[in-house]
């Protein structure tokens, strides 16, 4: 999404504030977080100043480094009743595949899950590096067909199928049909 989009600018400002808050909470310098996450210090500086436009991979690396759930970095505070229309919500695209993750619900305090709407197109799979230890992903496919699960042994799933797998090891989501869609719950321990 272009940074000129007002909704994206809002998400970027939320990410900037969240990164600053979580880096300070962890007691780490900008340089140390960038080093541990495997990103350039200038990239992290831009993100914290609200001028960057991060990929989902960059945000995941920062989440692992800061030991926070993905949605905690990207969701602004919200009212108790929340409706996200199909064309709304913070959206993040993968760098190397046609894969989009939209945060539907961040994990509230003392709970351990985040909820996403995934849309993907055939082509390169969304190859995910291991998330925080103990993370499990649950996926229900709503449209299309996909190979989902552990990188070494993905399973073909169809609309209505459910798959759960450990996400603290390499895993993939590969759309086999155009406009494949799924709901993904990321469960943290």
Image (cartoon, rainbow, N blue to C red):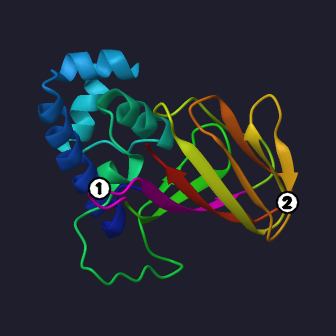
Q: Is residue 12 above or below residue 87?
A: above
> Is residue 29 visible in this depiction of the protein?
yes
Tally of numbered tags: 2
Residue 46, disc: none
Report x, y in % for residue 139. Answer: 67, 58
- Residue 25, by quadrant, is top left
Between 166 and 83, the residue placed more toward the observer is: 166
**Residue at 82% across, 69% down:** 159
Q: Which residues are magenta?
A: 107-120
Comes first in the chain, label 2 or label 1 = 1
Measuring from the top left, give residue 155's x and y in whole percent: 85, 46
Provide residue 80's location: percent of width, then percent of height: 27, 80
Q: Is residue 100 left or right of residue 122?
A: left
Q: Please give the residue where the numbered disc 1 appears in the rendered image.
A: 110
Q: Which mark is residue 145?
A: 2
Instruction: Give left or right: position of 11 versus 179.
Output: left
The reply to whether residue 1 is in sight is no
Q: With 105 as the anchor, is 32 left or right in this view?
A: left
In the drawing, does residue 84 fall left or right of residue 43? right
From the viewer's side, name the closer residue of 87 and 128.
Answer: 128
Q: Calculate the distance from the C-alpha at mark 2 to the C-alpha at mark 1.
A: 34 Å
Q: Quadrant of residue 108?
A: bottom left
Asked if residue 118 lies in the magenta stretch, the reply is yes
Badge 1 marks a residue whose secondary structure is loop
* Residue in view at x 50 percent, y 50 percent: 187
State whether residue 126 is above or below residue 157. above
Query: Which of these two is toward me, 178 or 186?
Result: 186
Question: Which numbered mark, 2 or 1, is in the foreground of this view?
Answer: 1
Position of residue 60 measured from the top left corner of the image (x, y, whole percent):
44, 37
The secondary structure type at the circle numbered 2 is: loop
In magenta segment, residue 104? no
Residue drawn 43% across and 79% down?
84
């Amino acid at each position: 999404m272009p940074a000129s989009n007002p909704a994206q600018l809002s998400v970027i400002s939320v990410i900037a504030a969240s990164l600053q808050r979580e880096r300070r909470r962890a007691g780490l310098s900008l340089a140390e977080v960038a080093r541990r996450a495997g990103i350039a210090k200038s990239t992290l500086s831009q993100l914290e100043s609200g001028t960057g436009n991060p990929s989902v991979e960059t945000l995941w690396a920062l989440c692992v480094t800061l030991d926070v759930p993905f949605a905690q970095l990207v969701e602004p505070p919200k009212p108790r009743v929340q409706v996200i229309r199909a064309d709304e919500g913070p959206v993040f695209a993968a760098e190397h595949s046609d894969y989009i993750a939209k945060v539907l619900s961040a994990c509230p305090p003392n709970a351990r899950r985040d909820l996403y709407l995934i849309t993907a197109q055939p082509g390169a799979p969304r190859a995910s590096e291991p998330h925080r230890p103990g993370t499990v992903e649950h996926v229900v496919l709503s449209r299309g067909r996909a190979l989902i699960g552990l990188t070494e042994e993905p399973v073909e799933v169809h609309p209505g199928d459910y798959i759960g797998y450990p996400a603290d090891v390499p895993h993939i989501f590969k759309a086999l049909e155009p406009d494949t869609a799924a709901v993904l719950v990321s469960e943290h321990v």
